[in-house]
Image: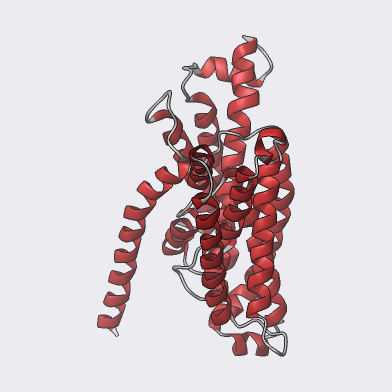
Amino acid sequence: MKPLSWAALLGLAVILVFLLSIRLGSVGLTTGEVFAALRGEGDLNIQRIIVDLRAPRAAMAILVGGGLSLAGAVFQALLRNPLAEPYILGISGGAATGAVLAIAMGLTASLSWALPAAAFAGALLAIVLVLRVAATADNRVDVRVLLLAGVVVGAFFAACISFVLSISDARTVRSAVLWMMGSLAGSDWTTVVMVTLYTLPAAIALVGLARPLNLLAIGEETAGYLGANVERVKRVAYVLASLLTAAGVAATGVIGFVGLIVPHGVRLLVGSDYRVLLPLSFLAGAVFLTLADVVARTVMSPAEVPIGVITAFVGVPLFLLLLRRSMGARHGAGIES
């Protein structure tokens, strides 16, 4: 199938899963009631459920799922490792530390914006620390050191979280653990607008870096000979992909596997041309997380399963399947050669 066909198919899928997400939930609604509410007609309570609760949640799933998947594809290009994912560079650890501190200090009880603000600040701190550690004496970014710096910074933040939780009461620990499992339950239009302001410009800029990322895949030295400003591309790609991840984590908590399996699966379908891979990864990630959220809300209705649990349950077997398929393809290529 051609890239444009995949794009059209995934674009249609995004619209369908959005409608599915606002159609299904603990309160049963008909399709007619949903469309009437979207037109501003019908029962006021149904309009509130659709417009104020389910629609912003579905929009958030699209933004965060697309952002995490796109960030994963960029990190895989930057680190030249198909197993890289958005949280590998310590961003989730920094965000989780900020969120846990806000919960432990009681800020979330009086200030609704304290939790996402603290999580975003923690993620930004992680971004700066990793970039500073990875910068060499001549101000170059070594991607191998970048990976190691991310692992070390992530371990440091994990220790900080463990320390804070060890001296906190049971209610704080429960709130922190639930946040770290990920949830779209608190989404509203204000949060959606804030995440959009970070996600869409960063996503457009990253798609614009597709050609130099293709050159980087060949090798940094070759990319430099072919006209790419290698250091600038690495820094810009790292910062923008990190901001995408930080915005998503700050709004919804830590949601794993989206940035790992979705771009990996898209790569198996369309190849490694980042001009195609990046936009399709965004669309596929949006579809994946929206469907995961529908399952999280309906599988044990009226109770809700943390969405991070759903993505892990789905992501682990899918990733193992993709990994076996990838290894089989490489083995077959080796035999033919």
In this rendering, does residue 203 appear at all?
no
Q: Position of residue 291 (x, y in %)?
A: 46, 39
Q: Nearer the viewer, residue 98 or 301?
A: 98
Q: Nearer the viewer, residue 159 or 307?
A: 159
Give the answer, above or below, for where 74 lies relative to 332.
above
Task: Please tell me which residue is depicted at 61% across the width and 30% down the height of the picture.
Answer: 55
Give the answer, above or below, for where 5 lies relative to 207.
above
Residue 26 lies left or right of residue 113; in this view the side is left
Determine the residue located farthest toward the left in the rendered image: 335
Q: Position of residue 80 (x, y in %)?
A: 51, 76
Q: Position of residue 29 (x, y in %)?
A: 50, 17
Q: Quadrant of the C terminus?
A: bottom left
Task: Please tell me which residue is depicted at 42% across the width and 28% down the height of the picture.
Answer: 298
Task: Please tell me which residue is depicted at 59% across the width and 20% down the height of the picture.
Answer: 49
Q: Position of residue 3 (x, y in %)?
A: 53, 58
Residue 119 lies left or right of residue 179; in this view the side is right
Q: Nearer the viewer, residue 173 or 224?
A: 173
Residue 107, located in which quarter of the rendered image? Answer: top right
